[in-house]
Image: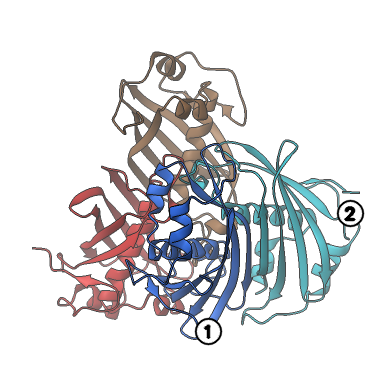
Chain colours: A blue, B brown, C red, D cyan
Amino acid sequence: MPGRSCETRTRVRYAETDGQRVAHHAAYLVWFELGRADLLRACGVDYNALEDRGLCFVVVEAQVRYLAPARYDDLVTIRTTLESLRSREMVVVYSVLRESTVLATGQTRLALVDRTGRATALPDDLSRALSGPEPPERGDAIISPIA
Amino acid sequence: MPGRSCETRTRVRYAETDGQRVAHHAAYLVWFELGRADLLRACGVDYNALEDRGLCFVVVEAQVRYLAPARYDDLVTIRTTLESLRSREMVVVYSVLRESTVLATGQTRLALVDRTGRATALPDDLSRALSGPEPPERGDAIISPIA
Amino acid sequence: MPGRSCETRTRVRYAETDGQRVAHHAAYLVWFELGRADLLRACGVDYNALEDRGLCFVVVEAQVRYLAPARYDDLVTIRTTLESLRSREMVVVYSVLRESTVLATGQTRLALVDRTGRATALPDDLSRALSGPEPPERGDAIISPIA
Amino acid sequence: MPGRSCETRTRVRYAETDGQRVAHHAAYLVWFELGRADLLRACGVDYNALEDRGLCFVVVEAQVRYLAPARYDDLVTIRTTLESLRSREMVVVYSVLRESTVLATGQTRLALVDRTGRATALPDDLSRALSGPEPPERGDAIISPIA
């Protein structure tokens, strides 16, 4: 399961730039979330269906290291990897690249919560989906087994 | 009821600026929403309670005219006026000012919808709150009867 | 030149949804901008290079009609068409679709301004690029001559 | 200088909420930035003037711990403290509260960069402003010397 990974591409939006003419630092958390969505999709998890069951992932900790700025219209790649998965928590790590330049790295710790907002154990199907064998390519995601 | 109005103040956030070093044009819809929230609050409407009843206002049309740019950290005032109120629709108009300079004007048409997303008539209490006599000052809003 | 058009695809981001579990109405202006970026790219205009010359397009008016909500993760298509082009102004129209359902339509009026913020006439190269014959497909954009 | 601190109040905007009906986790970085802006203002630093001199602060690292959700319209307080100041870097720490409940804590590491994007030492006036004696109350900020 560690090694579960995918790549997502997005262009820096004008609305994401700030007065410094580079992507605002909060945009990276949104890009990480795009990566996470593709990772779940790649594992066969339908996030809307999960929410319909009254479950959702909440970010309990986030960390970003900014190494180089991204300009408007840059095509950036988000590499997302499921770092660890436990009964009540998963850690996902990210790097954002423009071609071979690493613009930022980061990680988020996530908990699964129920409708009342209480942390809950991952149901078996979700746990299996996230820890099963490397899935085939799906949707927008490009599954790249990272050595 | 036409004439129901309030003023909201906010500072232009760095995250709201774009590569032109001015507030991004989508930020104005968010500011209009701040004004609308204060207008509802001023009328004694608790929006969270409304959503808990399964009702919410949805924007069905929005229009903005941009007259002058707003820079980072500018203190802007949003003047919000309930232009018209009908059983299933209300029209709210806005102007955004920096001191006496009008930066933008706009309007939104809103419908009330239920949990299924269907347009629904305003319940009596809501209708009364929005069309009653000018309310006393409340919360963040400054009620200014506009002639 | 009327008929110059392109299509852009994007997924509704979680950060774009609001408490109603649908895309926030301000997100549509950002999607329109994505469409406009692809339209310029399709016409061979490098927007960063334009800004480096001290020129930029500013939105002077925007209008959106919201017809149906977009949910998280929906794959939406933005159809962008250059409606009219004059010396100092261009009008661009948009429709946002999920498969064949039109979620929203809208238009923006844009002016070209120089470093001082003054409206300026389109330089010849830009004017030619925007009004020339239908360009070949480029970048992310799918050029679709709309009858 | 450690102990330099201020408080900023803001209401959770509807546009900041997400499908979970709570403030999106990226919004906290924007709130931290509001706090930072008030901290600079409180120290007598005019950020726009700084940018006009070709200098700006860039976030080189950010960290957030999310403890409890913030709902739409909640009035939140951001407590911002200058944790350390060195020639080329400052560390600012934050906590976000709703009344006495801590919703999140975090920190950002910032560098000052010049027009070319290169890290540069703080000019004397800026360094003095940030490390001088506790300033009097100014602008929106409420200076609260934290023991």
Q: Give the number of the mark in front: 2 or 1.
A: 1
Q: How many marks?
A: 2
User: On the image, which quarter does residue A75 sit in?
Assistant: bottom left
Residue A69 visible here: yes
Q: Residues within 10 Å of mark 2 (few under 14, many from 20)?
A: some
Q: Secondary structure at mark 2?
A: loop
Which amino acid lies under the numbered mark 1 shown in the image of this protein? Thr
Which amino acid lies under the numbered mark 2 shown in the image of this protein? Glu
Inter-mark Cα distance, 2 to 1: 42 Å
- Provide residue A146's location: percent of width, then percent of height: 49, 80
Query: Please, which residue is most extreme toward the left here?
Result: C147
Residue A18 visible here: no
Q: Chain of mark 1?
A: A
Q: Secondary structure at mark 1?
A: strand
Which of A106/B86 is in front? A106
What residue is shown with label 1?
Answer: A101
Q: Chain of mark 2?
A: D
Residue at image x 58%, y 30%? B141
Q: Which mark is residue C120?
A: none
- Provide residue C119's location: percent of width, then percent of height: 38, 64
Q: Is residue C134 above or below residue D14?
A: below
Quadrant holding the N terminus of chain D: bottom right
What residue is shown with label 2?
Answer: D134
Which of B125/B8 is in front? B125
Residue at image x 48%, y 57%? A127
Q: Is residue B60 left or right of residue D130?
A: left
Which of A147/C101 is in front? A147
